[in-house]
Amino acid sequence: MKKVLINFAHPARARSKINSALRAAVEDLEGVTFNDLYATYPDFLIDVKREQRLCEEHDILIFQHPFYWYSTPAIMKEWLDVVLENGWAYGSQGKALKGKIFLQAITAGGDNNTYQKGAYNQFTIRELISPYLAMAKLCKMEWLPPFVVLGIHRGTPDEKIQAYAEEYRRTVIALRDGTLDIVQARQGQYINSDLNSITRRQ
Ligand SMILES: Cc1cc2nc3c(=O)[nH]c(=O)nc-3n(C[C@H](O)[C@H](O)[C@H](O)COP(=O)(O)O)c2cc1C
């Protein structure tokens, strides 16, 4: 069983509907560590050694967050800036993250039609998150297409939210248990585009 670290960023958790549901679906899982960055570092003073130790102790790194201005909430950028040190994460001596799986779990208000070339949001989700792909490559991690929940808003029915939460739990379990076909997952646009075709039933 692999160990999964979920770095979570939501600056307004009390107002969160979908991320709260996703969180509830995975945080009790064996082998999963849920690391709430805004709760741990309300002043943005990230404990670099603690964060590096957490990364070293886990095999899979997930960044779970709502899409804010086509990117992550601010603390995740701060996390990258201070935790991914030269000689630890990258550079000729930096091998701490080598071979670990990296995945983003993103929720967004815009639906899939708005995230197409030239459409309302101009770019695809995959284009917009390309700095994270570049970061993962530089740190020698195995990048996977993101888990996405698109077109989510206040009026989204609870049953739909629950279905996404179950999909997320299934994805995390499959990654943890090594029952997700990584090679095939890389072919899809999103990791949850067609979960049935990339996961082996236990
Ligand atoms: C400051 C802010 C920026 C946002 N930026 C985007 C964005 O760039 N693209 C998008 O599709 N949705 C955007 N949204 C909508 C959020 O992504 C959406 O409300 C969130 O994913 C819902 O998850 P929650 O219920 O956990 O808060 C933004 C919301 C806020 C408050």
Image: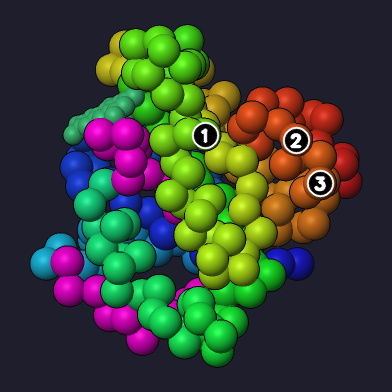
Query: How many marks are shown on the rendered structure?
Result: 3
Q: Residue at x 80, y 29 (%)?
A: 196
Q: Within the image, what quadrant is residue 39 found in? A: bottom left
Q: Contact, CB < 8 Å: mark 2 with mark 3?
A: yes
Quickly name the residue at label 3: 183
Q: Residues within 10 Å of mark 2 (few under 14, many from 20)?
A: few
Q: 23 or 142: which is nearer to us?
A: 142
Residue 143 in percent (x, y) is at 62, 53
Q: Residues within 10 Å of mark 1 (few under 14, many from 20)?
A: some
Q: Is residue 191 left or right of residue 115?
A: right
Quickly name the residue at label 1: 126
- Label 2 CB-ligand 1 distance < 8 A: no
Magenta run includes residue 34: no
Instruction: Tell me the magenta residue range.
Output: 44-72
In which quadrant will I find the N terminus? bottom right
- Tell which quarter ligand 1 is in: top left
Residue 91 in percent (x, y) is at 51, 81
Quickly name the residue at label 2: 187
| Label 3: which secondary element | helix
The amino acid pointed to by label 2 is Gln
Q: Is residue 177 visible?
A: yes
Q: Is residue 23 visible?
A: no
